Structure formats: C-alpha cells, structure tokens
Image (tube, helix red, strand yellow):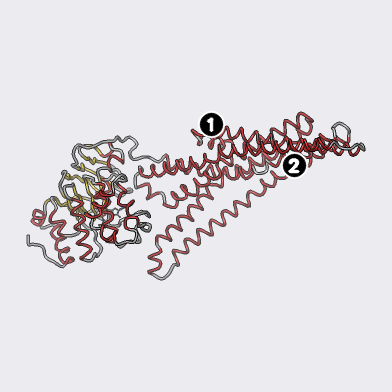
Amino acid sequence: MFGTVKRIIRWCGEFKGKLYLGFLMTFLSHIFTALPLGLAAYTVGGLIEATVAGETPDASWIWKSILIQVALVFFRFLFDYFRARLQEPIGYRLTARDRLAVGDALKRVSLGYFDKVSTGNILNSITTGLGTLEGMGIRMIDNFVGGYLNFLVIFLVLLFFSPLTALIALAAAGLSFSAMLLISHYSKKNAPIEAQANRDMTGAAIEYARGLAVVKSFGKDGAAMDAVSRAIEDSKNIHLKIEWGYLPGNALHLLALKCGSVGLAMAAALMCLAGSMDFSVMLMFVFYSFSIFASLEPISDSAHTLGVIDDAMDQLDALKENHFIDADGKDITPEHFDIEFDHVNFGYDDRLVLRDVSLRIPEGSSTAIVGPSGSGKSTICSLIARFYDPQSGKIRLGGHDLREFTCDSLLANLSMVFQNVYLFHDTLRANICFGKPDATEEEMIAAAKKARCHDFIMALPNGYDTVVGEGGGTLSGGERQRVSIARAILKDAPIIILDEATAGIDPENEHLIQSAITELTRGKTVITIAHRLATIRSADQILVVNDGQIAERGTHEELLGQNGIYRRFTEIRKRAEGWQIEKA
Ligand code: ATP
C-alpha cells in the first residue's frame, strides 16, 4: 500500500511540490474541520450547563460562536479550493504526457511487438489504465494521506484532553489499518486479473468491430459475437467474484471504525459521569467520535483502487520501457540514397522468411520486386523501413547501417504507399499534410493536383476540410489511394516504396492512380512490389523473390532470356492482364 503511494508520488515528478502543498492544504482544511466541532461542543455544552444551573445563557456568546464557525468553515473551504487547484490538474497533465510518451514509444518499437501484444492490450492501457490513474491516482493518495492527517489532528486533541480516549481511537485506527493492508494485498493480487478481463473485453470488441463487414456479408454474427459475449460474461463474473472478496476486509475496517466511535463516546460519557471530564469536553469527544473516523472510512476505497492503479502503472511502464529499436540511433542525414542488403537473414519467428538476401538499389533507380505470394516481397520493404531488424546480415542506406539511424531520421527519407491505405479520422487536409504538417495551402493543393485528387476533393461539400471516416472508410478505394499518394508527394522523400494494387481497379481509376504514381516517383529511388507488366518492364532492375531468396535479377530483357521463373511469371501476368507486351 505504501509502495503504491510512494510510486504515485514519484510519478508526480516535477509536480511533487504542488502535491505536497496540496497535502498541506488538506491538513489545514482538516484542522478547520475539527475546530468548528470543538467550538460547537463548547458552545452547546456551555448552554446546557447554564440552563441546568438555572442561569440565562449569554446570547452574545452564541452569536460570536456562530460568527467564528462561519469564519472557520470559510477557511476550510478556502483550503479545499487551494488543494483542488494545486492537485486536480496534476493527474490530467501527467496522463496527457504519458499518453504522448506511449505513442512515441510505440512508434519506436519493432513491429514484431504488435504481433505479440494485442491492440486491445495497448488500447486498454492507454484509455482505461491511464484513465484510472488520471481520475483517481491523485485523489486516492489525497484520501489516504488526508484521511490519516485528519486522524492525527483529532488524535492530538484527544491526547491533550484524555490519553485514554486517544488510546481507544488509536486501537480502532490500528485495527482498521490491518483491514486496509488486507484489502490492499487482495487488490494487488486481483488487479492484474481484472485488468486482463478488461483487455480481453476490449480486444474482443475491437475484433468484432473490425470484422463487421465480414459478419454482415455472411449474414451471421455467431462466432464473432460469441467471442464478445464470452469476454463480457467473463469480465462480469471476474469483477463480481473479486468484489465479493473485498467484503470481509471492508466489513472489518468499518466495524473497527464504528466500534471506535462508540467506544470513544462511551468512554467520554463514563468519564463525565465519574466527574473526571467536563460536560463540554465530553460533548466535544462525542462530536469528534463521529468525525475522527469519517475521514478514515473512504480509505478502504483507496486501498481497493491503489492495487488497480499499481497495475495501470505497471502496464504504463511496460509500454514506455519497451525495447526501442533505435535506442542507440543517431540523427543521420545520408549523403546518398543507395540501398544495400548484405547477406540478410530474417524471420518473424523461428522460421526464416528471407535467406541470405543480398541486393543493391542505386540512388535514383527504379526496382521492381516480383515473386509468388508469400515469397517475402513485403518483408524486404519492411526491413528497408526498419519495421524489423534482420537476424543477421546488414542493411545500409547511403552507406550507413540502418541500426545507426533513429527511426525518425531514417523514415524522413522514405515514403510508403501501401495497397491497404489507412487514412486518419480527420480532415483531408490533415491527412495529406500528415508527413509535412507545416506545408502551406499552395503546397498541399499542388500535391493533391499531382496526385489527381484535387477535383474529387473540391466536389465534396467541405472540400479539404471534409472529415474522412476512420481508416478512410468514407472514400472509395481509388480515392483513398490517391490521397495517400498526395500525402507521399507532399512529404517529398527521396525513396519511394510502393505496393502496387492487385485488386481489380477500373480503367479510369487505374489511369488516375498511375498518373499520380508517375508524379510521385519522378526523380526518386523507387522500389515497387510490382504486379503490372508495364511497371515491371520499365524498371531499371527486377528482383525475382522466390521462397525468401533472390532467385533472379536483371532487366526485363535479361530475365526473359534466362527462361526461368520470371519468364513463366510474365506469361501468367500476360494472360491475367489480357494483353500482350512485345515479344522478347
Ligand atoms: P504477398 O505477395 O502475398 O503480399 P509477400 O511476397 O509480400 O506476399 P510477405 O508478406 O513478405 O510475402 O510474407 C513472407 C512470409 O512471411 C509469408 O510466409 C508470411 O506468412 C510470413 N509473414 C508475413 N508477415 C508476418 C508476420 N507479421 N508474422 C509472422 N509471419 C509473417
């Protein structure tokens, strides 16, 4: 329990000063909560004593007492206000910083990480986990620290008037603290189980939402919905089971505090009867007997939540402390853009996908990568972008091993245009300017014109300010592709990696996309996972990948002459495209 409190305080970093000042405000607020009780007891006691003695109570004293009460209550709220101003923003500021840090960390891990950690996991840590920390982290330690500070203040008052009653309060608080340790131990043990149930539920919901098109096209949601229902049911059962487990600890905690209250009041009453305590002091004790433990009651919620917060912080640390692929990288600006693979071996897991691949792509040249499905074409492109590191061998850009670069300085040299274009749920303007946020309006429009998307964008009601659906879902496939090409044109990177569309595109669209690609690739080093014979034929170099190896390499004419895989491949493509290219 103390470990988590300390951990949250450490997490506060540069805001620690405000946090401590907030604790001071809480302490003062508690003093100003205790004083009115003492004053009320003293006033009421005086009134009763005067009435019993048959005297007329002094009305001016009552008014004075009320005025002092108002002043004390005012100060109490003032300190509460300062506490809130000091402490409340801390959680929001820190979690905003951490969310950005996680975003940055995710950008710098190998893509292999995402094969192991599900989107549900990551999403849950960033939203639910950090949300818990954001909304409750600071409040919970304030509850904890504030609750015990309040106890301390009243305990000292009790000790001053009657050490015996202080001892009763201490015993009750001690028993409640043992219950708290029980609760916090239980919470720590179960928080990871709860968090996993939440992550599973999020993961299942994401999977269901992603697969909705398939679900609809098959007209059934059976298996897909089953997984979501199961995850929801499991989550409900796990949470319920864990909640039941808190009952004994909570009951012991409340029982200790309530018994403490009653014990305190009884002890004070007995002392008063025995004549060893003034009536007013006895009244004050009775009043304090309720308030001394009221501030300790919510601590059980803190003890419960501290475990959840601890787990959220574990998740956060795990995300932030990932092995950065570019931890030792430097910001390098290469002098030229030749790309080299030097005896590269790579596998996503134990199975080698690329075997002893060596190749050279000179700056300014165009390279077409062809080969059967699953042969390793996309993997070669992923390695150039350093989405993964090879198991052995070296990949160089401009003579520098890719491992020497930071991800940002490497990716600044690359633009990638994939078949499955992803557009952000944002305006077309923001999507096009993604790789160059400081682009002027003119530069953006020029890029959109070159990518042949200006006309269709201008025909939309909000033009460049049109917000596209998540992933670009509100645009046609061809439009999405052209927007992604505009994005790449605007970035103006010296190396272009293209995955040519294989899906049946209508001739009009294909013509527009080809014109856009011609604009994008002019004067650049171009690597294309090529399917169209026209692209392949015009490449300076063709790499034929087969079973993870470069099986053939050369120009179109050279490869046709070899009468190997490439020749067979072009014949199949010719038949598929339904037209003839010139005879070799
Ligand atoms: P296609 O033409 O069908 O896109 P490709 O030639 O581009 O195929 P790659 O995508 O490079 O082939 O895949 C090469 C091999 O690596 C395949 O056997 C594939 O199953 C495997 N593979 C690809 N991505 C992963 C991954 N993230 N994890 C594990 N294996 C993968």
Q: Is residue 201 visible?
A: yes
Instruction: Residue 128: give x, y in percent of width and height.
Output: 50, 49
Position of residue 5 relative to residue 230, above or below, is: above
Residue at the image position 24 percent from the left and 65 percent from the top: 504
Disc nearer the start of the sequence (2/1): 1
Name the quarter showing ligand 1.
bottom left
Instruction: Residue 422: give x, y in percent of width and height.
Output: 33, 55
Residue at mark 2? 290
Q: Is residue 376 visible?
A: no
Residue at the image position 53 percent from the left and 36 percent from the top: 7
How packed is label 2: few (under 14 Cα within 10 Å), some, or many (20 or more)? some
Instruction: Residue 30: give x, y in percent of width and height.
Output: 67, 36
Quadrant location, the C terminus: bottom left
Quadrant location, the N terminus: top right
Relative side of 530 to 99, left or right: left
**Viewer-proximal residue among 288 and 69:** 69
Asked which secondary structure carries label 1, the reply is helix
Instruction: Residue 245: give x, y in percent of width and height.
Output: 63, 50
Label 2 vs label 1, nearer the camera: 1
Beta carbon of the mark 1 residue lies under 8 A of ligand 1: no
Whole-number angstrom distance, CA of label 2 to CA of label 1:
32 Å
Tag 2: residue type? Phe
Q: Quadrant of residue 371?
A: bottom left
Tag 1: residue type? Gly
Residue at mark 1? 17
